Image: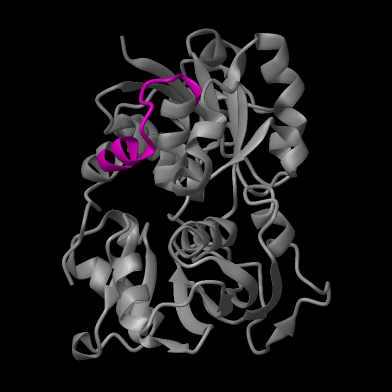
Amino acid sequence: MALKVAVNGYGTIGKRVADAIHLQKDMTLVGVAKTRPGFEGRRAVEKGFKLFVAGDGTKEEFERAGISVAGNLLDLLQQSDVVIDATPEKVGAANKPVYDEAKIAAVWQGGEKASVAEHSFNALANYPECFGAKKVRVVSCNTTGLARAASVLRRDFGVQHWEATLVRRAADPGETKRGPINGILPTMSLPSHHGPDVRTIFPDLPIATTAVVVPTTLMHVHVNHVRLARPPSDGGKVLEAFRSTPRFVLFRGSDHLEGTPQVIEWARDLGRPRNDVMENVLWEEGLKLDGEDLYFFQAIHQESIVVPENVDVLRAMFQLESDPLKSIERTDHALGIARVAT
């Protein structure tokens, strides 16, 4: 019997998660919910997804826009085993009493505080800890990228100390009202919130983060300096550790991918839906080991990196698969991101 999944919110993350759930053989997308009509809701109906009205939206408002709806959010929840909340930041936390009253398991996104759920989740990092949980939070895009990298480095080499500077894109491509247009904005909270968020998964990880916002809509870039506890003899062993782990893609100098514009073009050329890059992106020439000090860059696609995690978390919560690597393999195969050759 396939797991019946609802997605509340059908924007940047929600529409990608809905597509991903629809592709899984052990899951069924019951429907998606939106508060206001628009092109995304219209597209959901065109794709055959049942659309439900959430929040203070009304059926009449959708019908005036020529978009048919199947009911309201409570109707959707009553037909589902679990809801993935992909609503805007803070809205998800406000929805918690609704999910509690409906007695439904729930997944939130990283824009909500960790306290909204029993666990924070990353498939490579703590899948077993979320086995059988009823309320889980998938961490943010930047935290997902850091947690994946930490899973590799902790396991193979140990971490004495980690400093990361996050060069953050200012907005998603469709967010026309956000900036800066011409500027670099330091995040004045020092250290930034990303390090503590990683520690919701790895409580003992000695990581400190800072962040700046730059005028681009493509990807984030992390600048990492990690002091390893058990450094290998050369950086090639670190590259191989990343390369052999799912959800990492490494580029060579001969690929001529100099930065994030070429990475997005690479995704376009692969025919990725929406140009999505769900893996951590590393450059072989952008990694250097100097004694116990490891330096490396990684790029993170904000719109899509958390999508496969939203699938794997369901298998953990409902005990559909006990082995995280097997769940990852199933998810990635369905999404077309399994072991991309470069």
Q: Nearer the viewer, residue 213 or 274?
A: 213
**Which residue is most to the right?**
189
Q: Is residue 328 magenta?
A: yes
The image quadrant where one finds the N terminus is: top left
- Residue 23 placement, left or right of 140: left
**Rendered residue at 26%/37% (across/down):** 330
**Rendered residue at 58%/68% (across/down):** 159
Instruction: Give coordinates of residue 61: x percent, y percent.
Output: 59, 28
Q: Is residue 99 visible?
A: yes
Q: Nearer the viewer, residue 302 or 338?
A: 338
**Rendered residue at 48%/63% (across/down):** 149
The image quadrant where one finds the C terminus is: bottom left
Q: Is residue 170 magenta?
A: no
Magenta segment, which residues?
317-329
Instruction: Give coordinates of residue 224: x percent, y percent.
Output: 56, 79
**Rendered residue at 71%/15% (across/down):** 100
